[in-house]
Amino acid sequence: MKVAVIGGTGLIGAQVVQLLDEAGHEAVPHSPATGLDLLSGQGVADAVRGADVVVNLTNSPTFDDASPAFFRTSMNNLLAAAGDADVGHAVVLSIVGADRVPDLAYYRAKVLQEDLLKAGPVPYSIVRATQFFEFVDAVLSWTSDENTVRLPATLVQPMAAADVARAVADVSLGAPLQGTRDVAGPEVFALDELGRITLAAHSDDRKVVTDATAGMFAAVPGDALVARGDAVIAPTTYRDWLARRRLKTVRGSG
């Protein structure tokens, strides 16, 4: 099977390409580095030509009010090319609970992307994942200074990027779902608690202050980002992931 992986050099995309190649398929990564520009349409037809499956893992460069325009234009260009090329399956990575957080422009933009896919000409699958372990440090940095990290007690159910990639690869190789598959980590944390665990693992003595107004996730109501129903639960725990990352760091510095 030939799979065009749009955004195939990023955190998730590179791992999806590797998994598909290891399974004996032809996974072709596409990105601006390979001459693809989803916004202008440059290189899109060439990227999807001959592909059985197209996986869209591209992301908006911002989380603000500009993100809906990015997803609208990029998805319309990709779906038009995929339809013309008779691609049999289009897969998009989205966010668990995106439709339950209307106050965030980026989450509204992801719902728009999903809706465009559903209405498009290609049989589809949507993989909705929870937040990635790899982004926790960045989330902490948004509302931190030299002494404190301010975080809301928003409930999150994060997962490892490797588990996200596995879920995307698995769905890509199956029949189109014509629907959505949710995947999530094995544990639910309050974000401020997750911050304390992270700082302790880094031997960072800054204090986490619970602040219901701090950062992007302050706009998330209740358990909106927690998986529900028949979500697939990934195996990797946050503490195990932290331990593996520390081990890699130690080995790399040795």
Image (spheres, rainbow, N blue to C red):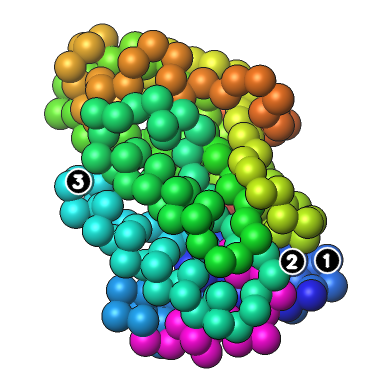
Whole-percent x, y for residue 129 in the image: 55, 39
Residue 45's place in the image compared with 194, above or below, is below
Q: Residue at x 36, y 81 (%)?
A: 41
Q: Nearer the viewer, residue 53 or 117?
A: 117
Foreground: 66 or 186?
66
Using residue 156 as the reference point, say whether residue 154 is left or right of it.
left
In the rendered structure, the answer to whether residue 172 lies left or right of residue 150 reads: right
Q: Disc 2 marks which residue?
A: 20
| Secondary structure under the numbered disc 3 in the rendered image | loop
Badge 2 crowding class, 10 Å Cα cut-off, few under 14, some 14 to 19, many 20 or more, is many
The residue mark sitting in front, 3 or 1, is 3
Residue 38 relative to residue 249: left or right: left
Identify the amino acid type marked 2.
Leu
User: Which stretch is magenta?
Assistant: 42-55
Above or below residue 73? Residue 157 is above
Count of numbered labels shown in the rendering: 3
Q: Where does residue 121 sit, x and y in percent of width and height?
A: 56, 66
Query: In which quarter of the view is residue 74 placed?
Result: bottom left
Q: Is residue 47 magenta?
A: yes
Q: How far apart are the alpha carbons under marks 3 and 2?
A: 33 Å
- The disc labelled 3 sits on which kind of residue? Asp
Is 240 within the magenta? no
Which mark sits nearer the N-terminus, 3 or 2?
2
- Disc on the earlier residue, 3 or 1: 1
Name the residue rendered at 62%, 35% in the picture: 182
Q: Residues within 10 Å of mark 3 (few under 14, many from 20)?
A: few
Instruction: Identify the residue under disc 1.
Output: 23
Which residue is the site of mark 3? 64
Alpha-carbon span between mark 3 and mark 1: 38 Å
* Displayed quadrant of residue 43: bottom left
